[in-house]
């Protein structure tokens, strides 16, 4: 299926906030999606993003996972990484809001890149512990530097391929309140990581999958996971997908949400 076809499949089923009657999803809309309050760390983090977008430096780069659709080679300009690999501002703020809304304390990120999304996850308060896995050593070094510069001592960057680092990291964490999967956009890897993380979740945990419409493989993984017996409801916002495990939900519900202005006739 083409990228346009995948978008149209989302658009055809998506509803706006006025059509949502689930209290849990309405809470998600008001406190996670539509919460626009700016926090003091935002400006500091975005200053770093801007520096990287304008950087002329290059770093060694090891291509892992599904790879980039646009870039190749064993070195990469930092500006290219910032442009293609960093989570957008909107996504980062949604992550921040999710951590705050669901009172997440133990956070796992797969795919630090340069550490921008990592910083947003950790910036809610100092009681949070964020462990972020990154396969490219040079990117991991930059992410560590950023955590230090932003005075976020609650960030730990683990370097290595996920197949080697995920299991021992989960063993140390013991519990995962929020997992952000943004490191390998392939069907097999997404299913594998979900299965490994699942035993460490509680009924208030959230798994966030980035770029669920990036490829047919990612979309198929998303469709499979929302039907998993442990998932009680899900929210698809096109750029990301959210999986919830709250057993108080009487029946499984899967929602696709779209901004009101994109479907004003609903």
Image (cartoon, grey):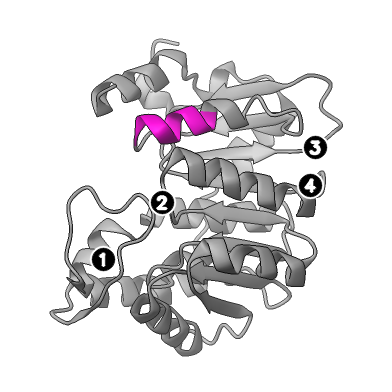
For label 4, the residue is 204
| x 67%, y 51%: residue | 196
User: Mark 2 or mark 4, which is nearer the start of the sequence?
Assistant: 2
For label 1, the residue is 81
Numbered label tally: 4
Using a 10 Å C-alpha cutoff, classify the residue at mark 2 as few (fewer than 14 neighbours), some (14 to 19) or many (20 or more). Answer: few
Using a 10 Å C-alpha cutoff, classify the residue at mark 3 as few (fewer than 14 neighbours), some (14 to 19) or many (20 or more). Answer: some
| x 37%, y 25%: residue | 261
* Quadrant of image for the C terminus: top left
Q: Depth check: 53 or 45 in front?
A: 53
| Direction left: furthest residue | 56
* Quadrant of image for the N terminus: top left
| x 41%, y 33%: residue | 217
Q: Depth check: 181 or 153 in front?
A: 181
Q: Which mark is residue 246?
A: 3
Mark 4 and mark 3 in contact? Answer it, CB < 8 Å: yes
* Residue 108 in the image: above or below residue 224: below
Give the magenta-colored segment's residue range.
215-222
Could you tell me which secondary element the residue under label 1 belongs to? helix
- Left or right: 122 in relation to 86: right
Using a 10 Å C-alpha cutoff, classify the residue at mark 4 as few (fewer than 14 neighbours), some (14 to 19) or many (20 or more). Answer: some
For label 2, the residue is 90
Could you tell me which secondary element the residue under label 3 belongs to? loop
User: Mark 1 or mark 3, which is nearer the start of the sequence?
Assistant: 1
Cα–Cα gap, marks 3 and 2: 25 Å
Cα–Cα gap, marks 1 and 2: 18 Å
């Amino acid at each position: 299926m083409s990228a346009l076809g995948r978008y149209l499949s989302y658009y055809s089923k998506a509803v706006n906030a006025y059509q949502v009657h689930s209290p849990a999803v309405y809470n998600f809309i008001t406190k996670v999606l539509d919460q626009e309050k700016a926090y003091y760390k935002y400006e500091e983090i975005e200053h770093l993003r801007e520096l990287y977008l304008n950087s002329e430096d290059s770093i060694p780069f090891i291509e892992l996972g599904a790879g980039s659709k646009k870039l190749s080679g064993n070195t990469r300009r930092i500006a290219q990484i910032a442009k293609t690999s960093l989570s957008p501002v909107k996504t980062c703020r949604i992550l921040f809001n999710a951590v705050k809304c669901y009172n997440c304390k133990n956070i796992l990120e797969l795919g630090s890149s340069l550490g921008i999304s990592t910083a947003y996850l950790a910036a809610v308060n100092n009681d949070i512990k964020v462990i972020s896995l990154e396969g490219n050593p040079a990117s991991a070094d930059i992410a560590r530097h950023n955590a230090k510069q932003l005075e976020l001592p609650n960030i730990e960057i683990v370097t290595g391929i996920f197949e080697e680092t995920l299991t021992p990291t989960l063993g140390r964490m013991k519990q995962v309140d929020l997992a952000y999967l943004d490191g390998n956009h392939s069907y097999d890897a997404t299913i594998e990581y979900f299965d490994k993380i699942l035993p460490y979740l509680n009924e208030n945990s959230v798994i966030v999958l980035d770029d669920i419409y990036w490829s047919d493989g990612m979309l198929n993984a998303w469709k499979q996971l929302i039907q998993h017996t442990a998932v009680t409801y899900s929210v698809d916002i096109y750029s990301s997908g959210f999986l919830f495990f709250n057993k108080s939900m009487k029946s499984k519900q899967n929602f696709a949400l779209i901004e009101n202005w994109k479907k004003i006739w609903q």
